[in-house]
Structure formats: structure tokens, C-alpha cells
Image: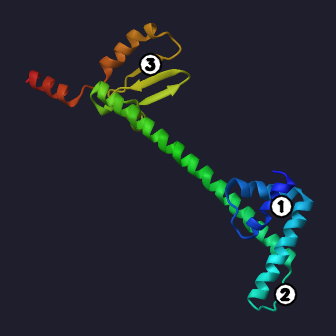
Amino acid sequence: MNCQDIQKLVTVYIKKELHGKKLEEFMEHIKTCKDCYEELEIYYTIQFALRQLDNNEQVTYDVREHLAEHLHQTEKKIYMKRRHNIYSLVLVFLAQMAVILTLVAQLQIWSTGNLESTVIYKIRVGTFHRQNNIVTEESENNQETKLDLEKKPEDNTSTIENIQENTPQSNDEAGRETQSRE
């Protein structure tokens, strides 16, 4: 904004009707432009004196100090608004990540049929570790199965088959196997 635009907004600012991006631009310009600051000071002094006359007050104040306090409060309000916007963005991002993780877990449950085979469950329980591009999964009998993530997918086929063989069976399969042994 140029000085002419700022000077048009001086009375709007004094009446506390200036908001949003225009308020931020106004404050930024007032900090750097001595002429516009003096214009604001003049209008603020006039408005302040008129209010005193309307209220029949005979109290004298340091108008410059009062204006400085008003500008400080406005800057504080802008800072709090920016801070609130940043916190809101972070909160929205975290919520989106939670939804994505939930969807991934649900897709894994639908594809495998049980909760225990999802990566999120394994991370939560502590049976899934990733170090140096090697995924290690501990089975119930403490055997470790390693999957090298740097190999091509066809090189890992036998390793994946080992993981599937060592993965605990679902409750239905375990129950059928127990019944067939009896």
C-alpha cells in the first residue's frame, strides 16, 4: 500500500473498523513511514479530544503514549491471530494424518481379515522394527524374519513367504486346527 491508501485508512483504524490483511498492511506501513505515522497521530489526537469533549471530561492524557499503547495492542492482536492460524493449520494437519493412518489400517484389516496383521498394530505392540532399510518382524516364538527393503520385490518373495508362514493364525483357523487334532 502507498501513503495515499494508508492515509485513507487512518480514520477507519481509529474507529477500530480495520481488520484482516488490510490491518496488517496498515500497521507495517505505519511502522516504516514517518509521514503516515504523523498523519495518524494528528487524527488520533483530534478524535481523542472530541471524545473528551463529548463526555465532558477535563482529564488530560499523554495522547502520544495513548496512541503508542493502542498501536501496541493492535500489533499484539495481529500476533495472536497469526499464532491462532498456525495452531489451526497444525491441528488440521494432525487430524488429516490421523484419518490417513486410520484408512491405511482399515484397508489392511479388510485385505488380511485380522487386526494383528496390520503394520500399525505391530508398531503399537512392538513386534515390528525398521532399521537400516531392513524390516524385522518378531513372531510369537521370538523368531525374527527380515525383509530387505533395498532388494527388488522378486528377491523378497521367499522372505515374504517366510513371514506369512511365521505369522500367527487368526482365531478361527487356530480353533479349527485344535478341533482337527482332537
Can residue 122 be seen by looking at this rendering?
Answer: no
- The residue labelled by disc 3 is 146
Residue at (38% x, 33% y) in the render: 105
Helix, strand or loop at label 3? It is strand
Q: Mark number for residue 61?
A: none
Labelled pair 2, 3 in contact (Cβ < 8 Å): no
Name the one closer to the observer, 168 or 152.
152
Q: Residue at x 50, y 27 (%)?
A: 130
For image coordinates 86% across by 80% down, the residue present is 62
Tags 3 and 1 touching, CB below 8 Å: no
Indicate the amino acid at tag 2: Thr
The residue type indicated by label 1 comes to Gln
Q: Nearer the viewer, mark 3 or mark 1?
A: 1
Residue that badge 2 annotates: 60
135 or 182, which lies in front?
135
Q: Secondary structure at mark 1?
A: helix
Circle number at residue 7: 1
Q: Please state which of the two labelled residues, at mark 1 or mark 2, is closer to the viewer.
A: 1
Relative to residue 137, is residue 70 drawn left or right? right
Coordinates of residue 82 in the picture (x, y in percent): 66, 54
